[in-house]
Every structure is written in C-alpha cells, then in structure tokens.
C-alpha cells in the first residue's frame, strides 16, 4: 500500500484524491468512515439544536429558517411537518450513520486486523464497496429532504400506514419517504457486507498464536456486533423492500382493508401494520447492541490499559457480550407492549428483557473491579471510558422501568424513553467513540490529540450530558409525549415548559462544548505531538512497530513482573516471550 | 480526582432532583393506576439504590486509584474471581426478575367481554377523536367507511339506512359514568394513533384494521386530557380530547337528552 501511494503521488491532484478515496487499505477506509460519521454527527447535532429551539419557541420567526426552508418555514415560522422531518432526519442520521458506523466500521477497520495479527481485512475490495454503498446511502438520505414535499415525517421507525400510503398521509410522505426507504435499504446492504467481512476476518485471518481466547475484548465485541448485524440488517432490508412494494407496487403487506385517509379510500386490503413493527424491531433492538457493544469492548480495553491491570473476568466479559447479543435478539416485543400485540406475549418479552440486566451487571461490576485497586492513569481516553461506565449505569437503570409492560404503558412514547435511549445508546456509545478516538488517534494520524483540551472537553461533555438528559426523565414523569412538534395544545404540558427550557439550554451547552473537540481534532491532525510506537504502553498488537510474529500470551498482561525482559515495565505485549 | 468529585456531586444532584422534582405525575384515578404508582415506587427505590451505589463505587475507585498512582504504590493484580462474578450476577438477576414478576401483576389487559359494561366506541383519525355511544336502543348500529363524512358530522361512518345507527350518539369528548365498568373499543381508519390519559397511567395504540379493547373503572368524577401518543402525522401534537368522568345519574341524563 505504501508503494502504491508513492507511485500515484507523481500524478495530478485528481488521481491523488481518487487514490485516497478509492482505497482498499483498511486504515484508509477507517478514516473515510470516521469522517463520514463526523460529518453526520455534526449535521445531526445541528438538527437537534434547531428542534430544541423550536420546542421552546414554537412561534418564533427566524429569518434564516425561511431562507433554508422556503416551504417548510415560510415567513420564518417552522411548520409541524418541517419539525417532524428534522426529527426523522436526526434519528436516522444518528442511529445509522453515527452509532452504527463509527464504533464498528470506523474503529473496527482501523485496528481489528492488526489486533488479530492479520494485516488486512479478509475482503479488502468488499470493504471499499461497503463504504461506497454507505456513502451513497447517506447522499440518498440527504436527497430525501430536498424533494418536493420535503423530508419524511414518520420518524426513524417509519411505522405504516403513515409511511406506506404516500403523500396523502402528509407532506414528505411522497417522494421523500420513498427515497428514505431506498437510503435505509442501501445502508442495510453496506452494513451486511461489513459484518461478513468482520466475521471472516476474526474467524479466518488471525495471525499465528492468536487463539480466540487470546483476542482483545475489542475484537470479541466487534465480532459479536458483526454477528448481530448479519442477523438483523437483512430483516430490515426485507421489510424495507416489502414496504416499497406497498408504496410503489400496489401490494398490501402492511395495509389492512377499509382505510380512509383524508377523503381518499385506500384500495389495499389484507395487510398488518403490526407486521412492520415486528420486522423493524427484530432489527431495531439488536441495533441498540450494534451501537453499544463495540463501545463496551473499547471501554474494557482502555480501562485495563490505563488501570495497568488485567481485565477482571475476561471470560465472563466474553460470555456477557454473547449473552447480551443472544437475549438482545429475543426482546423486540418490548417495543410493542402497547401496540395491540397479544398481552400474554408481553410477559415473555418482559422477563427476557429484565434478564439482560444480569450480563449487563456483570459487565459493569467487572469494569469497576478492573479499575479498582489499579494505578489509574487518567488520560482523556480513560476518562471517557470511566464516563461510559457511569452513563451506562444511569441509562441502563431506566430500562428496568421500561422493561415492565405495566410501567411502560405510561412511559411509552414519552420523554422518559427519549432520555433513556439518548443516554444508553447515544451518549454511552459516543463516550465509547470519544475514548476510541483519543486512544487510537496516534494510529489514525500519527499524532496525539491534545490531552489538556481533551480533558476540558470530557468534563464539560460529561456534565452537559447529565444536565440535559437526567432532568428529561422528569418530563416523562409528567407524561410529556415525544414527537410533538409543539407543546402548546395541552394544558398539562404548560407546567413542564420551564423544564423543557432547561433541557434546551443544557443541550445548547452540550453542543457548544463539542467545539473544543473539533478544535482539538483540527489542530492535532496537523500539528499535534508526533506519536510513534507503543504510545500508551498497551499490550495489543496494533501498537507493534513491525510485523508482530507469533502471539504467545493473552491480551491484558499488566502488572509487576520483574523478569529480565520486562525490567522497569509493568506490561508484556502479546507477542513478547 | 476531579472526576471522582464530579461523580459524587452528580449522584447528589440526581437524588436532589427526586427530592425537589421539576415535574411529577398527575393524581391516579383508577385502582390500576394506584397499583402502578406502587410498582413505580418499588422500581425507583431499587434503581435508585443501584444508581447511588454504582456511581459512588466508581467515584471511590477513581479517587483511590489516583492516590495509588501518585504515591507510586503498585496495584493489586487479579484476573477475576468466579465466585464474586457468579454472586453479583445471581443477585442482580434475582432482583430484576422479581421486579419483572411483580410488574406483570398489574398487566391485566385481557378483556373479558362486554357483559355488564358501558361500551363506547373510540374512533381516532388524523387529527381528531370521535366517541360513539349506542343510544336509547342500546344497540350499536352499522357503520362503514363509505358513510364517513367529517364535515357533515359523521366521523364514525354511521349508516343512515340502519335505524339502530341513527339513534347512536357521537361526541368529540369522551364522557363516562363514575363507578361503572367501561369498555372502550378503539378504532382507527387511517394511521396508528394512541389513546393516552396520564391519570389512568396507561396508554393503548389504536391500529387500523384492528379493534382493541381497553377497560377502565373510575370512581371519582373529573376531567382529564386525552392525548395521542403515537406519531400520526403533522397534527400529532394537536390531537387532543377530554375524558369527562360524570356522576352516573348525570351521565344517564346526558345520554337521554342527546
């Protein structure tokens, strides 16, 4: 690959650029994914700020709204349909293009092959294809908001009939919703190809001596994530194709007989709206773990490295990852407790859901036990990893409310749920991404991110995340429904407005402090401290300067060894005899 | 150091939020809703204890680990402890499954038929509610999509040719008698809506193509807001109605005068 890059550098700018873009080098692809999700997360964050502004100033006239959305905000006042299309775009971007891409596709590509002693992914060209399909999917998603009628307004869950009957159900439900389904379908294909690649790499490409039980926990969790992706994305792809057939081909998979929308009789008959929910959540719940499992692996790895201690209960951590994945495939019904599903089934889904608490508790206790009694090096990566544990506990506990069908019947579709999944899926996964970014930045760009700026960013983000999402649970206590474009109609929402204003201001704060990170990133890519070799005194193979050779030991050998090889050092790399 | 300190402050702030809540539940008006409050409180105490315990343990771990780093003391080494791991897994599993079992007691959603109940049809549509009562003959007349005419006041689609339908009462607010069993039959003609009354501590999706029963029994008269709680389109946040619980005699009189 090095030789290739040198060869093309003599040619023009275009060929140099295309060599960068159309690469099959897994680290270069990792960087492409990293920047794609970075762009996506910036857009998604801006959308959320606009929404938060609108919720507390529903009648405000904003000049630039009218310029950006001449139809959706003519006169500068945001219409409900524009709000809902921003909501749909925010959810889609964050779930797919941030939380799915960054943890697995970006960081998995970056270090998985080296951590395994493999040198490259199993299918480099398939890897490039995955990225390009994903990038195309992102463009189609953006296009869905630029067509007549605007973007779809059915949320990232796209429940039919709203999403299946076309523009009569609302503006944005025409061409916008069709393109949205195409975008998600493309994303499914990209994610599926990535998962096949990761699974093959883990199973077939491990270097000499790298037995499965010597793999770093990062690899185990990417593997579990890829298995979940492989099992769940095809289901969403199939569901998306079926709903496109309903929309464009006159079929009735999700549309029952006797529907009347506006004044128009719907000619479909025989379908079931609940079928979509089954298919969607059969994907959608594993998706939560697709977003969070890589973060769990990264956090285990980083806590051990900076506590200078072996991971407490390595085998239990591996087992817990697979227990969570397995149970995660069986609990989709807890999104449907009040959907009209047979109430008896709720009990089964509830017990299975609550059971996920057990392996999650093992993870949490083992993280703390890993750090407990260690000599902690509180680098920014370590702070984000510890912050992850704190957020994971807080966000996970609200799941114990939602896992009970009776309790869920009140909280379903309220801000309690919004607070729950933003903490456990959004913020926790983002902390994993931040931890990984600080930890592996030397591998990505040959330099270190600035630690001082990093710590400032961590503390402000940690406080901002709690300040935004902890009070949000209380809006749920008051029964505040989510996905409302304004809170003006209901009397019971008026006392909640001061709280909503607080949340909006906390969200502004949380977003603004991310500028510290962006500044750090922009500065460090160009002029950060040069970092070569084993920057953090880690044990895993991605930090080897040369080809690692044979692996002879497990991944987390930290501690006072006092042998002649490790004189003055408290760790042994996996390939060190 | 700072991180440990922030964790402690944060745990305190979390507890303070519950001592001085910025928003809270409305009063509960059914026996089920009262039981709901009990199960919520049980879950809250358990989760609250775990929250405080885990955050403070994390804080203590960081504070201790930092001191150790600075005093250059060597760390304690452990690759794990199977007994401990099995222990905390068993304890949490037992705790969470107990919650699941306790939580399922209040999940009595299987409808037991119409006998002895005040039956009311609920029709949700973009973006309004219509409620239908059987009228003086006690019979729900025939309805069909063809007859629906929102501007003409026939949102339920009553068949003008059916005498049993012509005396049916339709209304924009849901009036129910206090102290009687009420059975709501939920219908939607277009997209998925959701019937949500906070004081009942429950909600139920309304799905086109399905008739979903919801039973309630409210003793105390009063007026409560009905909100749609499933994204149904651009008017979702405006889809409001009222649940008006009337003294039974007054309710009977209201039905007769309609």
Image (spheres, coloured by chain):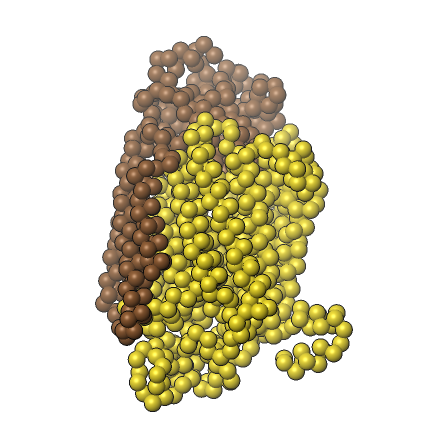
Residue at image position (56%, 24%) is B155
The hue in which chain B appears in the rendered picture of the protein = brown
Using the rendered image of the protein, determine whether residue A506 is visible from the camera's viewpoint. Answer: yes
Locate residue A120: give its quadrant.
bottom right
Position above or below: A393 against A86: below
Q: In this view, does A541 lie to the left or right of B16?
A: right
- The total number of labels drawn is 0
Locate residue B149: give its quadrant.
top right
Residue at image position (62%, 33%) is A61
Residue at image position (50%, 82%) is A545
Q: Nearer the viewer, residue A242 or B127?
A: B127
Position above or below: A189 against A154: below
Specify the farthest residue to the top.
Answer: B257
Q: Nearer the viewer, residue A133 or B50?
A: B50
Chain colored yellow: A
Using the rendered image of the protein, determine whether residue B103 is visible from the camera's viewpoint. Answer: no
Position above or below: B100 against A76: below
Locate residue B37: give its quadrant.
top left
């Amino acid at each position: 690959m090095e030789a290739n890059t040198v060869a093309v550098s003599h040619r023009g700018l275009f060929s140099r650029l295309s060599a960068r873009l159309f690469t099959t080098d897994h680290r270069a692809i990792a960087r492409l994914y990293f920047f794609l999700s970075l762009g996506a997360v910036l857009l998604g964050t801006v959308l959320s700020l606009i929404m938060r502004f609108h919720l507390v100033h529903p009648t405000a006239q904003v000049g630039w709204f009218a310029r950006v959305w001449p139809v959706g905000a003519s006169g500068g006042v945001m219409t409900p349909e524009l709000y809902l299309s921003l909501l749909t775009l925010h959810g889609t971007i964050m779930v797919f293009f941030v939380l799915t891409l960054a943890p697995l596709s970006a960081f998995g590509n970056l270090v998985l092959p080296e951590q395994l002693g493999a040198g490259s992914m199993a299918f480099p060209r398939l890897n490039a294809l995955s990225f390009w399909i994903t990038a195309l999917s992102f463009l189609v998603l953006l296009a869905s908001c630029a067509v007549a009628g605007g973007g779809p307004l059915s949320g990232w869950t796209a429940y039919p009939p709203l999403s299946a009957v076309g523009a009569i159900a609302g503006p944005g439900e025409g061409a916008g919703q069709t393109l949205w389904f195409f975008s998600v379908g493309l994303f499914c294909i990209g994610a599926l190809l990535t998962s096949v690649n990761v699974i093959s790499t883990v199973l077939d490409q491990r270097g000499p001596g790298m037995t499965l039980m010597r793999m770093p926990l990062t690899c185990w969790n990417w593997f579990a994530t890829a298995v979940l992706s492989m099992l769940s994305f095809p289901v969403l792809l199939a569901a998306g194709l079926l709903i496109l057939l309903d929309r464009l081909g006159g079929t009735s998979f999700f549309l029952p007989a006797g529907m009347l929308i506006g004044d128009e009789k719907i000619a479909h008959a025989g379908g079931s709206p609940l079928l979509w929910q089954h298919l969607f959540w059969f994907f959608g719940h594993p998706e939560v773990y697709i977003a969070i499992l890589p973060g769990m692996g990264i956090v285990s790895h980083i806590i051990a490295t900076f506590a200078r201690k072996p991971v407490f209960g390595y085998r239990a951590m591996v087992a817990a990852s697979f227990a969570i994945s397995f149970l995660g495939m069986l609990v989709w019904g807890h999104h449907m407790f009040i959907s009209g599903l047979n109430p008896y089934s709720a009990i089964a889904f509830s017990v299975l859901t609550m059971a996920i608490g057990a392996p999650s508790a093992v993870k949490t206790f083992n993280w703390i036990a890993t750090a407990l009694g260690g000599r902690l090096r509180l680098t920014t990566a370590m702070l984000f990893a510890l912050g992850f544990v704190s957020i994971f506990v807080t966000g996970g506990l609200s799941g114990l409310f939602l896992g009970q069908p009776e309790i869920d019947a009140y909280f379903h579709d309220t801000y309690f749920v919004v607070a729950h999944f933003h903490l456990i899926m959004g913020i926790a996964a983002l902390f994993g991404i931040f931890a990984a970014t600080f930890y592996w930045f030397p591998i990505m760009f040959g330099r270190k991110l600035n630690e001082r700026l990093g710590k400032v960013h961590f503390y402000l983000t940690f406080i901002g995340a709690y300040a935004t999402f902890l009070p949000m649970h209380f809006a749920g206590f008051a029964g505040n429904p989510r996905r409302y474009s304004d809170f003006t109609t209901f009397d019971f929402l008026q006392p909640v407005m001061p709280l909503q204003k607080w949340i909006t201001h906390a969200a502004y704060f949380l977003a603004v402090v991310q500028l510290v990170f962006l500044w750090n990133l922009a500065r460090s890519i160009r002029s950060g401290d040069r970092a070569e070799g084993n920057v953090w005194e880690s044990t895993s193979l991605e930090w080897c300067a040369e080809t690692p050779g044979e692996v002879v030991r497990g991944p987390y050998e930290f501690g006072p060894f006092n042998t002649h090889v490790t004189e003055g050092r408290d760790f042994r790399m996996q390939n060190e005899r | 150091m700072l991180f440990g300190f922030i964790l402690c402050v944060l745990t305190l702030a979390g507890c303070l939020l519950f001592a001085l809540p910025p928003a809270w539940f409305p009063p509960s008006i059914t026996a089920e809703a009262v039981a709901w409050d009990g199960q919520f409180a049980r879950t809250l105490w358990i989760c609250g204890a775990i929250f405080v315990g885990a955050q403070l343990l994390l804080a203590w771990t960081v504070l201790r680990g930092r001191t150790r780093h600075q005093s250059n003391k060597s760390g304690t080494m452990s690759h794990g402890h199977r007994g401990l791991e099995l222990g905390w897994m068993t304890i949490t599993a037992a705790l969470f499954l107990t919650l699941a079992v306790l939580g399922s007691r209040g999940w009595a959603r299987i409808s037991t038929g119409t006998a002895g109940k005040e039956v009311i049809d609920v029709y949700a549509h973009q973006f309004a509610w219509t409620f239908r009562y059987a009228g003086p003959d006690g019979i729900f007349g025939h309805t069909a999509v063809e007859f629906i005419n929102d501007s003409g006041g026939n949102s339920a689609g009553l068949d003008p040719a059916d005498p049993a339908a012509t005396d049916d009462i339709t209304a924009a607010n849901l009036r129910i008698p206090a102290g009687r069993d009420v059975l709501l039959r939920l219908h939607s003609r277009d997209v998925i809506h959701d019937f949500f009354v906070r004081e009942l501590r429950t909600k139920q999706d309304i799905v086109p193509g399905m008739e979903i029963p919801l039973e309630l029994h409210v003793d105390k008269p009063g007026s409560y807001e009905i909100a749609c709680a499933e994204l149904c389109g651009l008017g979702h946040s405006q889809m409001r109605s009222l649940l008006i619980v009337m003294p039974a005699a007054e309710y009977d009189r209201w039905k007769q005068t309609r």
